[in-house]
Image: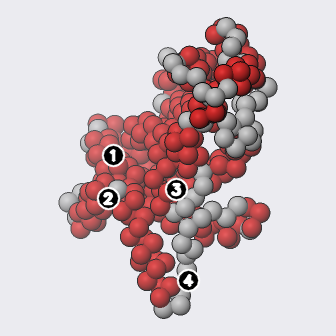
């Protein structure tokens, strides 16, 4: 297991390095003068000022030296300063990361637990009212975009009750842990449900299909013929085999959540990485964009390493491969 983990970590490190090279090339080698962009109309009036800003940013150095300095700063946790707010990029990420992580991980737990549970119950009761209801739920969930579902939840659970003087959920925003666990939790319920329901539908269908296939295998029928309890056969033998593709899908979804929560954050007024990314792209704030892309790459790599470890637990053949 240790050798398996080391191989995956080294592979992930190579991926992050390659992403850093691509990001550096994209934002620092691409045509265009950052100093001119920052100075705006003053750039044409004072060429000497353009040269000074270019030197201060280190953009007059050879490309390989710029990349080396970029890597050295990255290793030391220095991601530079925002061109517009002049604040450290690490500070901006530190402010934006907790809301996004809270939203992403909370929604992921909800859609995984309930998606798998509903899928298993639907597969073990095929062609029943429960199965039909689960199918209807899955199709409805897939059909709803997050911004539509989010606004519906706000309308039904905030605006309409507030007209009667009933305030159950807050309209928007994020409450940090410093305001208390209760305030944090109540602010995250509607964003969690919005993001989870849309994604949960995929897990219901995927789990149901895999469980129906696995429950028809010969070893499942053999286990039943030996007198094992139905619940033990279903959850101990069937579900374990059916979870492999579910885990694959979960790794893809969680890895892509860093960029996928932008719409949900906008609907509920959460100032997370999504809002920071949009603002940085609009302002062409390159240090912040580079930092967000690298963070997203690390997020994807870590998610896939965890998925590989779960593979090794579910299927011993993975460890021996």
Mark 2 and mark 4: Cα distance apart in space? 26 Å
Residue at image mark 4: 167
Mark 4 and mark 3: Cα distance apart in space? 21 Å
Please, which residue is most extreme toward the left here? Answer: 127
Residue at image mark 1: 206
- Which sits in the foreground, 133 or 56? 56
The reply to whether residue 240 is in sight is no
Mark 3 residue crowding within 10 angstroms, few (<14) / some (14–19) / many (20+): many
Mark 4 and mark 1: Cα distance apart in space? 37 Å
Say which label, 1 or 2, has the lower sequence index: 2
Q: Circle 4 sits in a helix, a strand or a loop, which is it?
A: loop
Residue at image mark 2: 144
Is 42 on the left-hand or right-hand side of 226?
right
Mark 1 and mark 3: Cα distance apart in space? 27 Å
Contact flag, marks 1 and 3 (Cβ < 8 Å): no
Please, which residue is most extreme toward the front here? Answer: 45
Is 274 rendered above or below residue 172? above
Residue at image mark 3: 265
Name the quadrant containing residue 180.
Answer: bottom right
Say which label, 1 or 3, has the lower sequence index: 1
Q: Position of residue 25 (x, y in %)?
A: 55, 17
Mark 4 residue crowding within 10 angstroms, few (<14) / some (14–19) / many (20+): some
Specify the quadrant that holds the N terminus.
Answer: top right
Say which label, 4 or 1, has the lower sequence index: 4
Is 138 rendered above or below residue 29? below
């Amino acid at each position: 297991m240790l050798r398996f983990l080391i191989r995956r970590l080294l592979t992930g490190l190579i991926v992050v390095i390659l992403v850093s090279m691509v990001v550096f090339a994209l934002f620092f080698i691409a045509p265009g003068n950052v100093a001119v962009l920052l100075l705006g109309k003053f750039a044409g009036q004072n060429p000497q000022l353009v040269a000074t800003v270019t030197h201060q940013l280190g953009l007059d150095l050879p490309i390989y030296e710029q990349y080396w300095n970029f890597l050295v700063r990255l290793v030391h946790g220095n991601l530079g300063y925002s061109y517009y707010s002049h604040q450290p990029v690490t500070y901006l990420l530190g402010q934006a990361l907790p809301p996004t992580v809270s939203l992403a991980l909370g929604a992921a737990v909800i859609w995984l637990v309930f998606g798998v549970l509903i899928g298993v119950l639907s597969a073990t009761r095929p062609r029943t009212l429960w199965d039909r209801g689960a199918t209807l739920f899955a199709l409805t969930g897939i059909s709803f975009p997050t911004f539509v579902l989010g606004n519906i939840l706000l309308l039904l659970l905030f605006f309409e009750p507030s007209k009667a003087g009933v305030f159950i959920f807050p309209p928007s925003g994020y409450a940090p842990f410093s305001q208390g666990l209760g305030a944090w939790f109540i602010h995250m319920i509607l964003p969690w449900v919005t993001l989870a329901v849309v994604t949960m539908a995929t897990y219901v269908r995927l789990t149901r299909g895999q469980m129906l296939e696995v429950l028809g295998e010969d070893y499942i029928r053999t286990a039943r013929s030996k007198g094992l309890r139905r619940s033990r056969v279903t959850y101990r033998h069937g579900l374990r085999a059916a979870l492999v593709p579910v885990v694959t899908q979960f790794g893809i979804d969680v890895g892509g959540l860093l960029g996928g929560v932008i719409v949900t954050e906008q609907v509920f007024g959460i100032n997370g990485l999504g809002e920071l990314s949009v603002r940085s792209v609009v302002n062409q704030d390159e240090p912040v964009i580079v930092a967000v892309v690298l963070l997203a790459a690390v997020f994807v790599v870590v998610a896939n390493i965890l998925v590989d470890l779960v593979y090794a637990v579910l299927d011993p053949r993975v460890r021996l491969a």
